[in-house]
Image (cartoon, coloured by chain):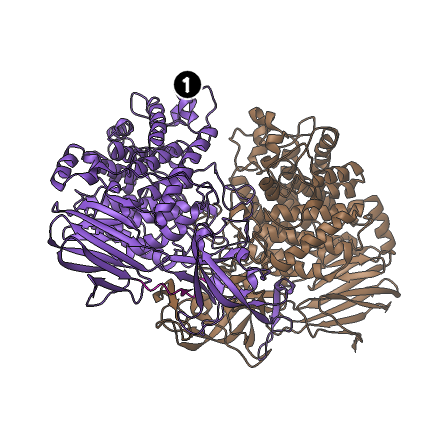
Chain colours: A brown, B purple
Amino acid sequence: MTRRFRPFVILAMSLGCVSAPARIEQSASQPWRGQGVVHLDKSPYAKLRSVPIRAVRMQDGFWGRRRKVTIEKSIPSIRALIEEHGYADNFRRLSKSKKVERKGPVFADTDPYKWIEAVGVFLQSGDQPQLRQWAEEWIDEIVAIQEPGGYLNTNFVGEKASQRLIPETMEWGHELYSLGHMLQAAIAYYRATGNRKLLDAGIKFADYLARDFGPDKKPLLAGHPEVEMALVELYRTTGERRYLELAGYLLNGDKRLDRPAHRIVYTFSGTPFTARTRLQGHAVRAMYACSGATDYYLETGDRQYWGTLERLWQDMLNGKMYVTGGLGSRWDGESFGASYELPNSRAYAETCAAIGSFMWNWRMLAATGDARFTDVMERALYNAINVGMSLDGTLYCYANPLESSGKSDPNWHSKDGTVRNPWYDVLCCPPNIQRTLGALPGYLYSTSKDGIYAHFFESSDLDWRLEDGTGLKITQKTGYPWEGNVDFTLNPERPGEFTLYLRIPGWAAGAKVSANGQAVNGAVEPGKYLALRRRWQAGDRVRLELDMTPQLVASHPLVLENAGRVAVQRGPLVYCLERTDQPGVRSLQDVALAPGGGPGKEFRTEFRAGLLGGVTVLKHRGTVKEGALSDQPLYRRVLTGGGAEAGTRHSSRPAELTFIPYYAWANREPSPMRVWIPYDTGR
Amino acid sequence: MTRRFRPFVILAMSLGCVSAPARIEQSASQPWRGQGVVHLDKSPYAKLRSVPIRAVRMQDGFWGRRRKVTIEKSIPSIRALIEEHGYADNFRRLSKSKKVERKGPVFADTDPYKWIEAVGVFLQSGDQPQLRQWAEEWIDEIVAIQEPGGYLNTNFVGEKASQRLIPETMEWGHELYSLGHMLQAAIAYYRATGNRKLLDAGIKFADYLARDFGPDKKPLLAGHPEVEMALVELYRTTGERRYLELAGYLLNGDKRLDRPAHRIVYTFSGTPFTARTRLQGHAVRAMYACSGATDYYLETGDRQYWGTLERLWQDMLNGKMYVTGGLGSRWDGESFGASYELPNSRAYAETCAAIGSFMWNWRMLAATGDARFTDVMERALYNAINVGMSLDGTLYCYANPLESSGKSDPNWHSKDGTVRNPWYDVLCCPPNIQRTLGALPGYLYSTSKDGIYAHFFESSDLDWRLEDGTGLKITQKTGYPWEGNVDFTLNPERPGEFTLYLRIPGWAAGAKVSANGQAVNGAVEPGKYLALRRRWQAGDRVRLELDMTPQLVASHPLVLENAGRVAVQRGPLVYCLERTDQPGVRSLQDVALAPGGGPGKEFRTEFRAGLLGGVTVLKHRGTVKEGALSDQPLYRRVLTGGGAEAGTRHSSRPAELTFIPYYAWANREPSPMRVWIPYDTGR
């Protein structure tokens, strides 16, 4: 927190320095330069097309600063730890350059892969010679162990080679999961640099699969979905349809590989995707499967897929998503629970599951242009994802509870129950956050046939083009999420008519929009894109004004733990109480919110530049119970027709409470935390 | 349910037909005849001594009928299934009488052991030739594979023999756990028949351990506690102190076997028992460890042990016990949660953990004569244990939630989520219930220096003696738990002064006691033993009148899921709603209790002989919400200073609700169930 960061240099992209026609020529000769996080330019069922990461330069805003920490601290430290734990040596072991034991879980290869992907997406924002050098060293070491037939995996070698891609192994062996991450890393790195070394290795492995496995060949099962979206992206990158077909085959499952129902549920693979009716089983697997299935839909337009995706999405939204955007209620199986099963201190809400939701909703958004998907992305990004990495970029959460004593029970990811750790033997989350934050510039905008979509609010400069080829620059200036005003300046290459689709967040009742100082007529509807169609010309300004009054949020009555409780949200940020900030309070369990004088009056906002990297805190005059709750018995008889038995009432005194953003908790000394606070809703 | 049972013949015990002095002589020559479930006659720190199972004959009351189903249906069917699944063949495989693969988990040997123990305790109530023959066939086959050195285990043989009792194996290998169950079976069988065959084998194994392992020898770890209480019981049975010492060594842990903290927590073994401060980790392991530690205390009087036991008990009672007496809040790790972490539909509450609590509290009771322990036993017995076996004795629960949709998600014990199953690959629970119900007669009474304790209420005939040798018969007549009157008739061999300690259950406010028709003066205090000291003579009568008015029970405010909810209890029975019994109700989630006109007026009781084997149902005029809860959003903004946003209120209509005892749920077609029901407590 108190360390100084080295100056962060974002190199000017060559892309931003040439005129539009030249850019398009260059793009044709270097197709990788124009490809977004998900490359949808030729996807027949995509309504929106991605904007390349390199086309958006983030300024020193909320995410700009998180990205800076990521590239300066997180990426180098995770590389060092991967080395220290021997996960990179697993490759050197096979190339005989090091004589060591294999280390880590069967899927340990994915950690270098995801790290390379993170570097790949960051390099799309400008060169980083040291990172590039490190990545290419690893890439060289990885491709060096590829077998002539294309197979590449550090686990299923030697005496375990006989277990490769056989029915008994596929369910848990993570071979295709590993390939999926290898392909995603390869594609990101290719899109950053044009370097095809890892990509060609990935293609060779994928070609081996496409040749030997499939409906009339050997059967294949994903076990842990991930490769599906990677294969579709490989199809988009290469144009080779066999990868799309292989993804479809995996999503459909192969009846020859029959398995017990509970394992089909858990792994979210091996039965036709379109036979699923609800989200259950392992949350990350489910999100990755949904992402891959949406990719498949975007290419094929298969309506059965769309029906299933919509149904599963409703299942998530209506009963299985934490207010933070986190997913996965259960520690056992790292899995979804039943609808409304959303425990707080026992929330699993793995960081990777929220990232999976972010990826899935991005694809659903691309298919529809519907802002309900962007709302879910924003909720996950600012809360359930952002909480996953410490403010200083060196510690990570695996599970993300909404209530904590400051320490969890010892568990398999954190042997002493520490919430944030520098390393996990199952390292999926840290590089997953890195790649997500690295790719963020590519998520701010999309283009459509008739214009451009502005999804997220961040001080930044877009330099791209409309789909008709007209160059377009857009500057965003905003203090979001601390402040509610967002100023857009549009600079089209030449004046022309198109639509700016401006997202009005679902939480933003009362939002106002003006263009060139004139209020926009018509309904500005929360949870929709406001379509501003006009003849735009250089210097046109659009201002979005969001009402940042803190809001109280209640849960569905069947979320039992939240009965009588509310969460506090301001803008996209969910807030929490950390006991550290409540000096007179013995236990957060004694605290309640007190009814205020109406919206806007219960909270006082205060930006504190020196706190937690700079946050807006919320002050509220609530109450604290007097007397110890622990004196009460676990069960007591209730006498009807009168009150409860004696000894169960407590008097309360007023107390000033200070809320901090949820993402920033557990960045000081260990402290109890809670999101859902008792409140008399007046019902 | 509708099947006819074969007539159940309880043979008159020879013990009941001879005079007291002769009985004592016989007891000296056949010491096994006088030994109770836990043989405390020489335990210096036991305030109470057990009464042999054979000294109490149960009539056709509540438990008498459950025992009848157990011996006629459950015990034969579980034997057949153990055979069918090859767990008995594991022994034959080693004696070369059958050429088969080893089957089942590493601890599969314990299933035949526990089954033999169940038969052993039942045989103490009278001979059952078929069961005796089956048991002795298995015993012969078990002892046949014992190695000359004493080791006996079907898993760690052949190439796995090198893994025996080494540090790497002991934590998960369940070798001592298996020995523990073998010893308990051997002792029960010996106490039934005097047959020492299995006992001698167990002694040989225990002698090998006592000789080769210990502080100055090889280190030993329980991994799954169980052997501790078995070793203390072996000490009590043989008088050989080395078994007590070995138990103490295991309870204290061996520093040479250092392990990560989370595994020490989980296994509840390997660190000094007296260093524990709370119940955490695997619930069954914890309960078995506490049982063994109490056994150790009863022999040694070690005050540090007592301090830890009392502290752990308070930890259980004040925050970790379900209202059913169930223990273990978490599926992952089958473990305790934090205090007040008591989810309902996600309760694990393994049947074995409730049985472990029953065993532990029996030992705590023996040490103190304190009725708070009996209260916990009764709560567990009538609810969390009894629910574990279906009414027809052929289906079992592993987990025992307090709320259910009628089916759980597929899980590792129930692949399709069925609540009650005839078989589990991890079979611990079914024979555990059998041995508990088999031993029940031995739990009704204890003796003390100055008299006799009556713990539980069941129509039955005691034929035993006071500690001074005076013969004493006591008859209980009662319709408990359906009716609240219990009539005791005392028949001492000769008139004499002693104390009858009559338990007044903790729930029984307003209980009345009379002796020979005269009301007993002084306070009859719930949760205490009422000491009736007088000169008793043949034919003396004591009547206990318990107020069976249904009670509403509320939880501590930190049990978040139960906020605003109550459970219904009548006598020792916790009740529940099963949707089957609520014809007009679409979902139990729509149902609430309505405030009544004071205690005794909200419920109408109705005994239904034809329902669920004969149960008293409770009728209540509650309310049902109209409109679908599922239409409400998962999260909604709450506007302060006014009500919630529109669309969140529901009108309700009155509805007659029918409650059944919790233990009887899931004995008809699958149906949603819940224990905790919303209720306006008027607070």
Residue B304 seen anywhere in this rendered image of the structure: no
Magenta includes A316?
no
Q: Residue furthest top?
A: B96
Residue A89 vertical placement versus B460 (above, below): above
Q: Which residues are magenta?
A: B546-560
Foreground residue among B445 and A279: B445
Q: Is residue A425 above or below residue A680?
A: above
Looking at the image, which is closer to me, A447 or B329? B329
Residue at 15%, 48% (x, y): give it.
Answer: B466
Tell me the residue that label 1 is attached to: B97
Residue A31 lies in what quarter of the image?
top right
Residue B401 shows in the view: yes
At numbered mark 1, what does the secondary structure look like: helix, strand or loop? Answer: loop
Q: Tell which subunit mark 1 falls on.
A: B
Dominant SS type (magenta): loop
| The one of B2 and B42 positioned closer to us in this rendering | B2
Q: Residue at x 68, y 32 (%)?
A: A256
- The residue positioned 19% from the left and 39% from the top of the image is B17
The three-letter amino acid code for the residue at tag 1 is: Ser
How far from the left and from the top, in percent, is residue A357? 65, 53
The quarter of the picture where residue B518 lies is bottom left
